[in-house]
Image: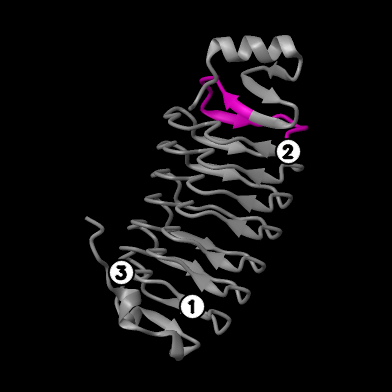
Amino acid sequence: MKILCIKTVLLLLFLGNLFAQNEFIVIEDKLVSYIGNEKNIIIPGGIKIIGAYAFSDNNIVESVYIPEGVTSIERGAFYNCINLETINIPNTVKTIEELAFFMCKSLLKIILPNELTEIGYGVFYNSGLIEITIPEGVTIIPSMTFFDCENLVNILLPNTLTYIGFGAFFRCTKIKSLVIPLSVIHIDIGAFFGIELNDIIFENVNIISDDIFSWYDYR
């Protein structure tokens, strides 16, 4: 998943729609893969999409600078980058897809762009986040977004939020004051499993139910 096979790269080079820019493999305006070994990475200009699993399982990278013009970070782009500590995401990014920062254990803080409107499920699954602000415009916290983020203490949710998915804050046991905005009309099962009711402030008390604090075994 991480690196295109040699035959595929050669074929795409032959077809003329892929080029190598330093240690970046690019197809048109999409960064497909990073094949270098630098700790601090500056993604080149002209890129609009960080492709699926482009940096996945990279245990070297510590910081990434994403330039203006990038609009989307695709599925699992930084999947299991266990030493990633800092990432700059420009305001041009509107979507961050599922599992993009899965298991980024060293990522303690991230600033999401103001223009962001969509995040995918499990995007910060078991990451090291301590605090985060979800920008206005985001309407859904999907399933397992912060699943097992055991270090998460502070999170600010937007007034545009309407839905919190299954297991969204599962076992985020260090959260001590989470405000659920009045705009939220549905919370799925297990969203707050492991969090005490007293640690959550519901602006709309009608959405409180036992299910949102419970869990069940799929097996």
Q: Residue at x 44, y 60 (%)?
A: 143
What whole-number distance in Å separates the C-alpha atoms at marks 1 and 3?
Answer: 16 Å
Query: Which mark is drawn over residue 186?
Result: 1
Residue 65 x %, y %:
63, 38
Q: Which residue is mark 3?
A: 193
- Please give left or right for residue 68 compared with residue 38 in the image: right
The x, y position of residue 207, in whole percent, is 44, 85
**Magenta range:** 32-48
Q: Is residue 44 above or below residue 190?
A: above
Q: Amino acid at mark 1?
A: His
Q: Position of residue 12 (x, y in %)?
A: 68, 15
Q: CA distance from mark 1 to mark 2?
A: 34 Å
Three-letter code for the amino acid on which mark 2 is drawn: Lys
Question: CA separation, marks 3 and 2?
Answer: 37 Å
State the SS at label 3: loop
Circle on res. 48: 2
